[in-house]
Image: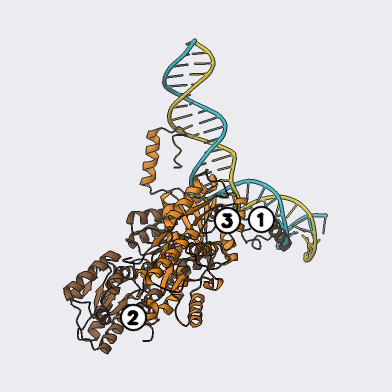
Chain colours: A brown, B orange, C cyan, D yellow
DNA sequence: TACCGTAGCACAATCGATTGAGCAGATGAC
DNA sequence: GTCATCTGCTCAATCGATTGTGCTACGGTA
């Protein structure tokens, strides 16, 4: 049943008879026993902050499809951004002898990578760079630069006087946000603008935080900013109620961007420029790294995201 | 390490020494070996159509949290509504000796349930009723009735002349949609209205189908209907671009409902009445059924969904 | 006829845990 | 003093597959 009958010099006739008998009896090998003997399990593990987030659920989908295509069983654990839960989950997955581990959005990827190396388990860190491990990330810097440039173009067309847009959301301590901030600054510099620090409001990813930050900003300015970029779909969820209740004239004067994609954002009262991360590509690249002996640890692979323009632009 | 040291009359001192040594050596038992011996794996399987759908990803989240809380490892397989893939995935999960299986939105739940019974594996069908198996479903009928009644109330307030709303999306051959249609008809009957068949357009769940159906409907009527209920969030995704491009007056005359919830729908140009399925409750109930020997197969447990009113109503 | 090589299969060892059975020494009852 | 009981532990069997090794029959060659 292991598929090695030729190597073991079993005659084709016998192999056929065995296969026929197995089919007849609805027999299928116990995969735990097989895994025990072969020191591999056929399981592939994935660590994820949460499922309820379009970006992560797209990654989960791509992961599921990709692992099934390779004949493995996907084991996805949502760790709720809790470091302890992450550590426990890694231990669990390793205890099941997962053949490989894919880690998305962990709070301490370096520790996880060390643990995997100690257990000699292939692993890839997705969505954030990690020293000493293979990682696959979106090109946050260039993506945010393109988004910012697109928004600056719109501001120019609108003849807006106020130069740079504001950036709300994300955690500056995390590499993803840091890269996006670099991209933001770079795009402004290209346009001979300067991003004063007050324009960058990295208030975290929680909807409520973004909501509060946007309300405070509007109070400070006396109106909505002429350009606004929301860093992530969860932050957008918090900003949206505020934006959609602005007076018509005010929202018409505010060009909005979002670093993440949702089809719902294409149909709001106001246009939204979006960045769509290529989740299938991220996951395909991650799996390529897993079987490719070509990728030495410490490799960083970058996937370019996609700029999604509002309809008719 | 199995935790049975007391039953095996090991002295507490020795048990402590063993635990200390294990901690010291970073030892953790091989769960495949344990599973082999105990004829259980600590894995809980879940079958899901897809991750990229807020309803399903909420279920996945609840499943993940619930299984971790019980010390099991969640194995979620997205089968893309493909019957063959579903069958293969069930075989895979059974071959891994999953301790239990939760099936969401399968195309042939009865066949899956038979297979699980043959393998003597506890299982629960979620989101659709299944003869001869334990199933946990949303109360689609009452939910849709409440949604319809709420929309009728709004139509009354608006002084709309045209009686009943239209229902777009879903598959009338599936129990969930069938129940919702029953609820729709019942609410209309309560209001002394009759739902002519042309008002029920069960064109499937795909965004494009809903989009096409809505466009056709509007052409037929010469304008948007005064009341419109979209059956599921995916169908809404298709309807939204049409709705949001309607002239202001036209959309103002169209009261919209959706049988599903997304925070983005609370902030559109027009109000949306929504039904939110209680995913955590569905999953908690499913797990309760799994360990409760109280639930004989053939049990149907019903979870009431929640009516979400537009802001300020 | 003796020898060798090969095809095809049978048998036992192995993976790493859990668990049933048994054994030596201490304790207690009569 | 003898026997039964209990404590605490050791040892081997077991789960269900894969894999290493050996055995038999057969054909070919010298």
Q: Assign a secondary structure to mark 1.
A: loop
Neighbour tally class for label 2: few under 14, some 14-19, many 20 plus, Cα within 10 Å: many
Pick the residue in front: B170 or B37.
B170
Q: Is residue B265 visible?
A: yes
Task: Check residue A271 in the rendering and tell me which mark sits there, or answer none.
Answer: 2
Q: Which quadrant of the figure has residue D14?
A: top right
- Name the chain under label 3: B
Task: Check residue A159 in the rendering and tell me which mark sits there, or answer none.
Answer: none
Label 1 – label 3 distance at C-alpha: 24 Å
Screen quadrant of the N terminus of chain B: top left
Label 1 – label 2 distance at C-alpha: 57 Å
Q: Position of residue B10 (x, y in %)?
A: 43, 33
Q: Assign a secondary structure to mark 3.
A: loop
Q: Position of residue B172 (x, y in %)?
A: 56, 67
Task: Check residue A26 in the rendering and tell me which mark sits there, or answer none.
Answer: 1
Residue C6 relative to residue A125: left or right: right
Screen quadrant of the C terminus of chain B: bottom left
* Residue bearing mark 3: B130
């Amino acid at each position: 049943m292991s598929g090695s009958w030729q190597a073991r010099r079993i005659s084709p006739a016998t192999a056929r008879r065995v296969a026929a008998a197995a089919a007849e009896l609805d027999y299928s090998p116990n995969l735990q026993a097989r895994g025990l003997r072969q020191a591999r399990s056929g399981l592939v593990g994935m660590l994820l902050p949460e499922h309820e987030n379009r970006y992560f659920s797209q990654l989960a989908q791509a992961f599921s499809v990709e692992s099934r295509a390779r004949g493995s069983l996907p084991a996805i654990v949502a760790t709720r951004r809790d470091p302890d839960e992450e550590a426990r989950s890694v231990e669990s997955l390793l205890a099941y002898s997962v053949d490989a581990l894919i880690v998305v959005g962990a709070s301490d990827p370096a520790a996880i990578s060390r643990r995997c190396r100690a257990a000699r388990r292939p692993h890839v860190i997705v969505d954030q760079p990690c020293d000493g491990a293979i990682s696959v990330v979106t090109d946050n810097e260039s993506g945010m630069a393109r988004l910012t440039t697109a928004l600056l173009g719109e501001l120019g067309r609108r003849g807006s006087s106020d130069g740079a847009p504001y950036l709300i959301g994300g955690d500056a301590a995390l590499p993803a946000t840091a890269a996006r901030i670099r991209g933001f600054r770079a795009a402004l510099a290209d346009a001979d603008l300067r991003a004063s620090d007050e324009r960058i409001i990295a208030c975290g990813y929680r909807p409520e935080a973004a909501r509060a930050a946007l309300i405070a900003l509007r109070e400070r300015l006396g109106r909505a900013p002429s350009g606004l970029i929301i860093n992530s779909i969860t932050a957008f969820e918090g900003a949206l109620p505020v934006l959609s209740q602005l007076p018509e004239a005010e929202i018409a004067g505010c060009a909005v961007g979002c670093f993440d994609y949702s089809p719902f954002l294409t149909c709001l009262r106001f246009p939204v420029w979006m960045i769509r991360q290529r989740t299938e590509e991220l996951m395909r690249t991650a799996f390529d790294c897993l079987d490719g002996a070509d990728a030495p640890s410490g490799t960083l692979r970058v996937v370019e995201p996609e700029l999604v323009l509002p309809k008719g632009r």
